[in-house]
């Protein structure tokens, strides 16, 4: 009888060890799935590391990222949310209600160019690890020539 209980316990443990968890899952949308599919080309240990990387990218190329939205995970998903950041020179996409009566002359041209540069990050349930996709193609000059179109911090 004791031997049967031990075998049952071993079988139960083996079944539990083979069960799917968020950490070992390969289901669509899980961390491992996203890593293997290669849709996310960047990885950060946590949100703080991502923010440091984002700020370094902004500083290096004199660009600015703006949060443009997020998407919550559907029920039962292996992830929490996706966040979207766009280049500060991208159009907002909203419908324009206001119409100018006269054209004014600007010293500096419009900041908005429709730039396609964006960052998408994905957060997961079981880990602080963040995966991200960075499309760095700008349709405008970056670096010193972009500074007039970038909001500078008070420290700068």
Image (cartoon, grey):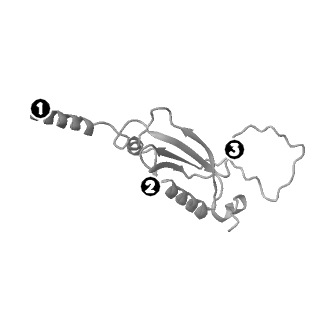
Q: Which residue is mark 2?
A: 45
Label 1 belongs to which residue? 4
Q: Residue furthest front?
A: 1
The foreground one among 56 and 37 is: 56
Q: Quadrant of the C terminus?
A: bottom right
Q: Quadrant of the N terminus?
A: top left
Q: Residues within 10 Å of mark 3 (few under 14, many from 20)?
A: few
Residue found at the very far right of the displayed protein: 102
Under circle 3, the secondary element is: loop
**Image coords of residue 99 (percent x, y):** 84, 40
On the question of residue 73 being in view, the answer is yes
Q: CA distance from mark 3 to mark 1?
A: 67 Å
Q: Secondary structure at mark 1?
A: helix
The Cα–Cα distance between marks 1 and 2, rounded to whole angstroms, is: 45 Å
Label 2 packing within 10 angstroms: few (<14), some (14-19), many (20+): few
Q: Position of residue 56 (x, y in %)?
A: 56, 62
Query: Residue at left 90%, top 46%?
Result: 102
Q: Is residue 156 visible?
A: no
The residue closer to the viewer here, 29 or 90, is 29
Q: Position of residue 105 (x, y in %)?
A: 86, 54
In the foreground, 75 or 98: 75
Residue 100 % position (x, y): 86, 43
């Amino acid at each position: 009888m004791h031997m049967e209980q031990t075998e049952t316990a071993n079988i139960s443990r083996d079944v539990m060890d083979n069960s799917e968890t968020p950490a070992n899952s390969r289901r669509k949308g899980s961390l491992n799935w996203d890593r293997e599919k290669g849709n996310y080309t960047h990885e950060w240990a946590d949100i703080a590391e991502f923010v440091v990387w984002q700020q370094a990218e902004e500083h290096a190329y004199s660009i600015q990222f703006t949060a443009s939205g997020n998407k919550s995970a559907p029920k039962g998903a292996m992830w929490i949310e996706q966040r979207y950041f766009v280049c500060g020179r991208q159009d907002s996409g909203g419908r324009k209600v206001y119409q100018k009566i006269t054209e004014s002359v600007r010293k500096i041209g419009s900041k908005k160019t429709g730039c396609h540069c964006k960052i998408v990050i994905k957060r997961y349930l079981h880990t602080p690890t963040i995966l991200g996709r960075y499309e760095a193609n700008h349709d405008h000059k970056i670096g010193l020539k972009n500074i007039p179109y970038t909001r500078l911090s008070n420290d700068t």
